[in-house]
Every structure is written in structure tokens, then in C-alpha cells.
Amino acid sequence: MMNTAPSIIEYLNDESRIYFEKVKQHLTDLEIDFVEDPTLVRGLDYYNHTAFEIMSDAEGFGAITTLCGGGRYNGLSEELGGPETPGIGFALSIERLIAALQAENIELPIKKGIDCYLVSLGETAKDYTVKLAHQLRNAGFTVEKDYQDRKVKAQFKSADRLEARYVATLGEDELANNKINVKFMETGEQVQMDLATFVEQFKKLQA
């Protein structure tokens, strides 16, 4: 019956459809494999736009196993008597996550602070730093960025709080010129790097 029923995708309103397409585009840009499953249902009905599960096929589970599940909820805070606060949440199994990490021989970093904080100015730069953060993490660096469209000063405060060793700033002007500004927080020294080769240049800073 499920296979012959209409797909929920056909009944999305414009807002949900645009949001869902943007989520899929970000996953594609980050080279994260995903399967669009219109039959996926979470246990609670306060989600909107997107629900998700993160799966693992690590050896030892015997089958593809769910590590994490969640979704977006724009109205949950109001339902609980709070202010309008859109958000996204998830729940994960610590036991399964630890088992997956062990199966993949992944060790968690224990060093203090982070290697780089990415500051973005403008919508295009914000989207670009999502990909940049992914590339840096794949290269072995600890990275954070702003997702709240805060002003530059507030983003630098976050970098200080996270004890970032470097802050890389990308705005629309830098994008147009294929450049990114990098600041060494300990000394205040600033340099400008080519955006296309930033990850490789950042590796040399750590050498």
C-alpha cells in the first residue's frame, strides 16, 4: 500500500519545497551521500520542512544502523510557552556512535581550542564557508563558523570564546577577487590568501 500511495513530496508548500531543496543542495555541495525517503517518519509531529536520520554501515553492526535522527521545528518553542525560536534538533545513541567510531578507528581530538573560525559577510559568503569548513575538517582541522547571520564583531567574539588560533574572514569583495583574509589571533598578524588554494596554504601555517 505504501508503494502505491501518493508521495508527500508532491504536497509540499512552496516554503517547505524551497527549504528542502536548499538542504539537498548543501548536502550535494559537501559531497555527503543522502537518500530522499518520503516514507521517513519521526516519532513526534512537531517537525516541519525536514526530518532526517544519519545511518552507518560500519562493520560490527551487521546491517545499516541508525545513529542519529531529528528534524527542524519552527514552532516548538511557542508550543511550550516560549518566544518564536526556529530550530533543529536531534537525538543520538551514544553506544552506537562509540561502536561506529571504534569500527572506523576514529579517535576524537582532545586538544584545547580550535584551529580556525570562519567569519562570513553576506549570503553567498555564508554558503561558501559551509563548504570551506567541510574541506578544512576533511584535512584534519577543527573548525567552527557562524550560522546566525551575526555581525563581524560578534563572530570574532565567538572565535575568542572558542580559543581559535586563526580567524579566516570571507566577504563578497573577497569572493569577487578569489581571496580570503586570515588573522593569527595570538599575534594579530594578518595575511591574505588565494581562496582556491586556501586549505593547502592553511596546512603550511600549521607546519
Image: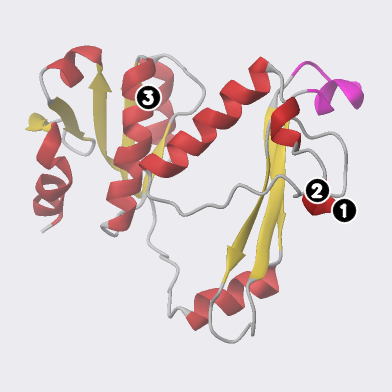
Work out whether residue 73 or residue 120 is closer to the camera in this orientation and state it: 73
Q: Quadrant of residue 57?
A: bottom right
Decide if residue 41 is in sight here: no
* Badge 1 vs badge 2, beta-carbon distance below 8 Å: yes
**In the image, is 32 to the left or to the right of 184?**
right
- What separation in Å lies between label 3 and label 2 (alpha carbons)? 41 Å
Q: Which residue is mark 3?
A: 126
Task: State which quarter of the image contains the C terminus.
Answer: bottom left
Task: Answer with mark 1 or mark 3, whichever residue precedes in sequence.
Answer: 1
Mark 1, other Cα within 10 Å: few <14 / some 14–19 / many ≥20: few
Q: Is 122 drawn above or below residue 70 in the view shown?
A: above
Q: Which residue is mark 1?
A: 1
Check disc 3 and give the amino acid type: Lys
Check disc 2 and give the amino acid type: Thr
**Residue at horizontal 91%, vertical 21%?**
81
First to last magenta residue range:
75-84
Mark 3 element type: helix
- For residue 4, the mark is 2
Question: Is residue 19 located in the magenta-colored stretch of the structure?
Answer: no
